[in-house]
Image: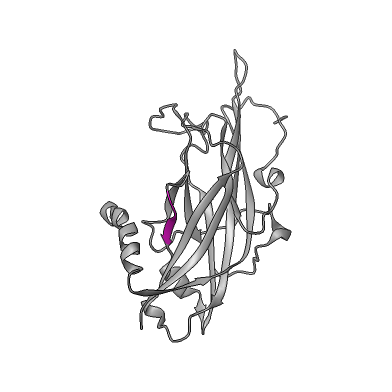
Amino acid sequence: MSSLTRRLFPLFVGLVLVGCREFELPLSLHTSTARFNEYQSGPLCGPNNHPLVDITSTVPYAKDTVLAGFRSDFFPGAQPFPCNRLTAYRSQGVMVFTGRVPEGVPLNVMTALLEISAFSPTVPIRVTEARPLSTGTTGTYSGATRESCRFRVTTYPRTTYIPGPSNYGGDWITTAELTDAGTDRFWVPLRGPQSINVTEEFRRGVIGSDVVLRLAIEPDDRAIPSGATNNCYGQFTVRLRLLAPDA
């Protein structure tokens, strides 16, 4: 999708709503996973003596909202041979929407939108774009601190994995880009509801008249491996909207 198309997509959504019917599929299952990464500045670093506390250990499971985001703790080393160490924690909000295709509505005329209507940060957002500790990094980094960060929506295939409170804080799952990769990324704080086009994923999730749509919200910020202490995580409010032309 071109940059022009991305800018026009919200307008397209507004036009679609004129003279159309709207349905909604419920969020039936969700959870949040955990991923931990450790970076260090050189081979002389010893064991990591800092406590490892991931996001899902500090934020309780919520029934109606989905947790996602990242935090990182930077520990600068002491001279003359500093061992700079960074621990990064990411949480991925995994979702399943289930239901039935509205009766009498052809599948090929339906548009499916994941609407992200709210984001409630657990802690104040603070992200610094410092140079990553990982070796082989190129490019420039401003060192500026911002109160915003970026996320993306992805999909994952049919699997035996079932989200829910019992596996809250489990291992990060493998996901794939959306078919429409032009509307999948967004920033928080939200300036308004975000509409992510998941039409093709919705259609692939239909078997007969039953729908099972698997999606995830993931942090997608270039500052995650930065040599800085960063925080951007919280609870998302989501719903799946189905739009179809009037009969």
Residue range in magenta is 192-196
Q: Quadrant of residue 141?
A: top left
Residue situated in front as seen by the camera: 221 or 247: 247
Asked whether 123 falls inside the magenta stretch, the response is no
Question: Quarter holding the N terminus?
Answer: bottom left
Q: In percent of the image, x 58 and y 52: which residue is there?
A: 92
Q: How is the image coloured?
A: one colour
Q: Is residue 112 left or right of residue 227?
A: left
Looking at the picture, does residue 68 appear above or below residue 64? above
Question: Which residue appears farthest toward the bottom when viewing the image?
Answer: 104
The reply to whether the magenta stretch includes residue 193 is yes
- Specify the quadrant that holds the C terminus: bottom left
Q: Is residue 4 visible?
A: yes
- Residue at (59% x, 25% y) in the render: 84
Q: Which one is nearer the viewer's eye here, 186 or 77?
A: 186
Q: Is residue 161 left or right of residue 116?
A: right
Res 176 seen here = no
Tell which residue pokes out farthest to the front in this image.
19
Q: x, y (%) of residue 12?
A: 31, 63
Q: Is residue 199 above or below residue 229?
A: below
- Residue 197 locus on image (x, y percent): 41, 63
Which x, y percent locates residue 244? 39, 76
Q: Quadrant of residue 63?
A: bottom right
